[in-house]
């Protein structure tokens, strides 16, 4: 995991304080036990790729310039208190990969239904 500072001055010395926490998890077939039987599993795996992304944006708007560093520290402290225990859990990689896989399956199904509907309308 890494934390990136994407803060910016948006108007007259007031800032949008933003810290982006991101990381990657490798897609392992072991994580997808019970899901690979789906007829769209191969297509979903292809779309998913070898790694899935974790990304969380922490923001606070309207921060006076002199308070930006303190607010970024507060945002990270809040993340560490609330999200880090979840991320550090031994099952986090599996849960993230399974969730992304299921989201990808859903997107494929929706796309296919739309394509079917479009074909019918023609």
Image: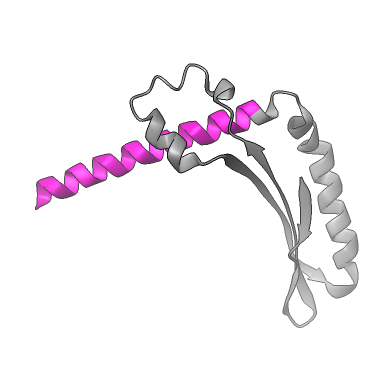
Quadrant of image for the N terminus: top right
Q: Position of residue 89 (x, y in %)?
A: 76, 26
Apparent side of residue 74 relative to residue 10 in the rendered image (left or right)? right
Q: Position of residue 28 (x, y in %)?
A: 59, 28
Apparent side of residue 67 relative to residue 55 in the rendered image (left or right)? right
Please give the name of the residue rendered at 72% of the width and 58% of the height, measured from the top-left corner. 59
User: Could you say which quadrant of the image residue 99 lies in?
Assistant: top right
Q: Nearer the viewer, residue 65 or 39?
A: 39
Q: How many marks?
A: 0
Q: Position of residue 43 (x, y in %)?
A: 38, 36
Direction bottom: furthest residue: 12
Q: Position of residue 90 (x, y in %)?
A: 74, 24
Apparent side of residue 80 relative to residue 115 in the rendered image (left or right)? right
The rendered magenta stretch, by its main secondary structure, is classed as helix
Apparent side of residue 78 relative to residue 35 in the rendered image (left or right)? right
Please give the name of the residue rendered at 46% of the width and 35% of the height, measured from the top-left corner. 45
Q: Is residue 96 magenta?
A: yes
User: Could you say which quadrant of the image residue 65 lies in?
Assistant: bottom right
Residue 6 sits above or below residue 110 on the image: below
User: Could you say which quadrant of the image residue 24 lies in?
Assistant: top right
Q: Is residue 3 magenta?
A: no
Please give the name of the residue rendered at 76% of the width and 71% of the height, measured from the top-left corner. 15
Provide the residue span drawn in magenta. 94-122
Please give the name of the residue rendered at 83% of the width and 50% of the height, measured from the top-left corner. 76
Direction top: furthest residue: 34
Residue 77 sits above or below residue 38 on the image: below
């Amino acid at each position: 995991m890494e934390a990136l500072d994407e803060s910016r001055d948006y108007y007259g010395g007031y800032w949008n304080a933003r810290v982006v926490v991101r990381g990657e998890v490798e897609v392992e077939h072991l994580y997808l036990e019970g899901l690979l039987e789906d007829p769209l599993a191969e297509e979903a795996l292809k779309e998913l790729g070898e790694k899935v992304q974790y990304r969380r944006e922490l923001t606070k708007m309207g921060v006076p310039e002199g308070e930006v560093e303190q607010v970024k520290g507060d945002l990270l402290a809040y993340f560490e208190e609330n999200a880090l225990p979840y991320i550090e859990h031994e099952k986090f990689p599996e849960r993230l990969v399974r969730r992304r896989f299921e989201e990808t399956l859903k997107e494929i199904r929706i796309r296919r239904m739309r394509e079917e509907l479009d074909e019918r309308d023609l």
